[in-house]
Image (tube, rainbow, N blue to C red):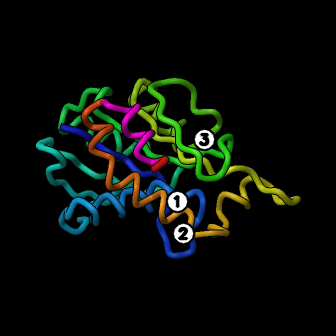
Amino acid sequence: MYLIVGLGNPGSQYELTYHNIGFIIIDAICKCWNFQPFSKKADYLTTSDIINESKTILLKPYSFMNNSGISVAKIRNFYKFSLDNIIVIHDDADLELGRIKIKKGGSSAGHNGLKSIDSFIGNDYWRLRFGIGRPNDQRDLADYVLSKFANLDNATHLVEKIAKNIHLMLQEDNTAFIRSLAL
């Protein structure tokens, strides 16, 4: 059984922003693999189904980025997930736009959503880091991550590839997963 968490902020003003790439990818996985619609709980949205014979829960914390760890801990504790079976999808300003990296464990690198999760469950879970780059103008990084994607078409294509091939991560074939994104 797997838990895939997409980080983002609730509310229409945050839709299609760089910081909400986790929500965008979770929605794409839900659609690609024909999951049921999300059900809303107090501070998160969740749905579950099967991806390649593995029960998979998709989670969108709905308590703003800085409190993401609360709902991740609730779901982890209820289902008794091993950290090996948790994947957190998030934006990463230290990677160029559209670059993807997979990493297990490590620091939050200043990402408030990861800091929150780390404080509740530790940091030894899988991360799918979606590069958003840094602003090429004078904007503050906080303003940049909350701005809308400049070229949504390129991002959409990559998001669809991630959704289609997420089963490779669940099979622990991260090399094949990364390779599938380059095709």
Q: Which amino acid does label 3 sit on?
A: His
Task: In the rendered view, tell whether residue 80 sits above or below residue 157.
Answer: above
Q: Residue 20 carries which label?
A: 1
Q: Quick one: label 2, few (<14), some, or many (20+) residues within 10 Å?
A: some
Query: Which residue is the extreme one toward the bottom?
Result: 12
Instruction: Name the N-terminal-most of marks 1 and 3.
Output: 1
Separation of marks 3 and 2 at Cα, in angstroms = 18 Å
Pinpoint residue 85: horizontal percent, then vertical percent: 28, 32
Q: Which mark is residue 111?
A: 3
Separation of marks 1 and 3 at Cα, in angstroms = 13 Å
Pinpoint residue 117: horizontal percent, then vertical percent: 45, 37
Task: In the rendered view, tell whether residue 182 sits above or below residue 105.
Answer: below
Q: Quick one: label 1, few (<14), some, or many (20+) residues within 10 Å?
A: many
Looking at the rendered structure, the secondary structure element under dot 1 is helix
Answer whether labels 3 and 2 touch (C-beta < 8 Å). no
Q: What residue type is labelled 2?
A: Leu
Q: Mark 2 points at which residue?
A: 16
Pinpoint residue 77: horizontal percent, then vertical percent: 24, 34
Judging depth in this view, the residue of 49 and 116 nearest the camera is 49
- The residue located at (18%, 48%) in the rendering is 51
Q: What residue type is labelled 1?
A: Asn
- For this view, does 138 lie left or right of residue 93? right
- For this view, does 111 lie left or right of residue 52? right
Answer whether labels 2 and 1 touch (C-beta < 8 Å). yes
Query: Which residue is the extreme one toward the left?
Result: 53
Instruction: Name the N-terminal-most of marks 3 and 2.
Output: 2
Point out the stretch of residues depicted in magenta: 173-181
Pinpoint residue 89: horizontal percent, then vertical percent: 45, 46
Judging depth in this view, the residue of 120 and 6 nearest the camera is 6
Q: Does the magenta-highlighted stretch encompass residue 83?
A: no
- For this view, does 26 lie left or right of residue 67? left
